Image (spheres, grey):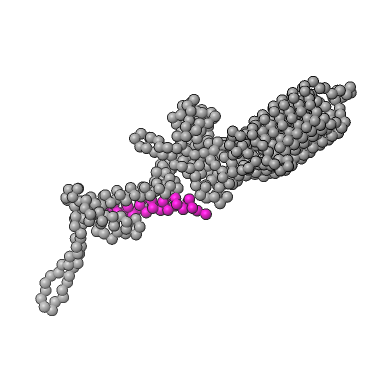
Amino acid sequence: MLEALRDPTSGHPSFGPARFDGASFTGSARFDGAVFTDTVSFDGATFTHAASFAGTVFASLAAFNQTAFAFAAWFDRAVFTGAAAFGSASFAGAANFRGAAFADAVQFPGAIFNRDVSFAGARFENAPWLGPLVCGGTVGLDSAVFEAPVTMMVSARELSLRRTRFGATAALRLRHAEMDLAGAVLEHPVTVTAEQAPVNGPLDRPVPEEVLAAQDAGVRVRNLSGVDAAHLALTDVDLSECRFAGAVHLDQLRMDGRTTFARPPTGWQHRGPVPLRWSRRRTLAEEHHWRAATGRLTPGQEPSLREWQPGPHHPDLLHLRGPETLAALYRQLRKALEDGKNEPGAADFYYGECEMRRYDRIGTPWTERVLLTAYWAMAGYGLRASRALACLAAAMTATIAVMILWGVPAQASKQETIGRQVTAGQTLTLTTDSPDPVNPTSRWPERVTTERFERSLRVVINSVIFRSSGQDLTTVGTYTEMASRLTEPLLLGLAVLAVRSRVKR
């Protein structure tokens, strides 16, 4: 074990300019509480056992470029008054910078952490860059403070930014990461972007990512609870498992690029004898959690893609957001997309909002829920053209059947001219009238003829499109036509509205 001499007055070791370039520390190296008053360099050094710099003060440049840490490395509460350089450093064990203070630039270009690295509670006063670094575990920046604009380039399994405060603008360029932003304080614009290719490190070469080879390169945001989303912009990230409840100003959240959300269960479901299929749309993770808790999924059961996915508190409804909260979340996200001129993308969130209002038994009156149910069944809240067209086809089929059986008279009406013979020289008066339609009296199978079908079809088409059939009908046929003229053009309009909502600019 290497121990530096201690100053008898302060009790802490003190060094002037020190160079340990290429040195090999074969035992535990402890520099706890040491004070380096001038430049110190550990470039190319190797620590074969644990290295501890807890509470160490670096008054000038601290260089750890290409340093190899074979075991854990502690820099807890270390103070870096000058620049800190860890270019291409490798950490085989856990690395801890908890509570460290960085007054100048922090450089980790090409650094590789095989396990977790923690910057919890660290303070970055003037760090324009953090990375590019690769971490096979979790990069923890919980409760850290960034006082200056920073560009963060991180490839890691997880990135924890819980209660992190960004006092200036920040650009987070990430790969592979599952990010947690719960409680983060965003005082200025913060952008989160998923990088498509590995970022370049020293010498403009891509930083190797072998420790992350088994993980997808996409970026997944898991939690935005407690975040003021007014300053947050997300690009090409996965929000399928993100929890939005508790975030504020979600209507100002900016989502660009290929931003993905969760999907409803796939395949056909059976509700009694009727086969049903969930409508394809983008959903929130909170809706999955609530539906799984109120559905048939039991605790401990492994969910499949044919079922709603349970949340961390399944099936405890006390810790889950109800339909009234989910409706508000959908409403705010819908507005965020509409403000970004993405009306077709916002349609799914409108569908989710109406769904949650339909299930909300507290804030939605029963009459409104009945109307929403009818709106859902007929046209999928004005967003499903196929459903509206199917209802239109069913209504027209029913109308044609009624017309064939009862609506069309037994015989076509013929006008009759009635007059009275008079003597020569007198005025002849003629009266033209149409007889009342005669209800069909034959058996039902005999009424189904090609002629009656053609007349019924003409009546229905004229009623739906041209609003008037111009046909003589029986009493039943007249009232049926009136109902057809009211409902069927409405269904046709809903189909047009659904198509319009998907192609609207």
Quarter residue 253 falls in: top right
Q: Is residue 131 visible?
A: no
Residue 31 in picture, x, y percent from top left: 80, 25
- Dominant SS in magenta: helix
Q: Is residue 403 visible?
A: yes
In the image, is residue 479 above or below residue 100? below
Judged from this view, the residue extending furthest toward the right is 9
Q: Name the side, left or right, on which 379 lies relative to 286.
A: left
| Residue closest to the eye, 446 or 428 | 446
| Magenta stretch: includes residue 20 | no
Q: Name the side, left or right, on which 492 lies relative to 139.
A: left
Q: Name the side, left or right, on which 401 lies relative to 80.
A: left
| Magenta stretch: includes residue 480 | yes
Residue 363 in picture, x, y percent from top left: 48, 38
Quarter residue 369 falls in: top left
Residue displayed at 85% across by 31% down: 18
Q: The N terminus is located in which quarter?
A: top right
Residue displayed at 32% across by 56% down: 461
Q: Which residues are magenta?
A: 477-505
Residue displayed at 55% across by 36% down: 241
Residue 51 in picture, x, y percent from top left: 76, 25
Residue displayed at 71% across by 25% down: 71
| Residue closest to the eye, 305 or 3 | 3
Judged from this view, the residue extending furthest toward the bottom is 425
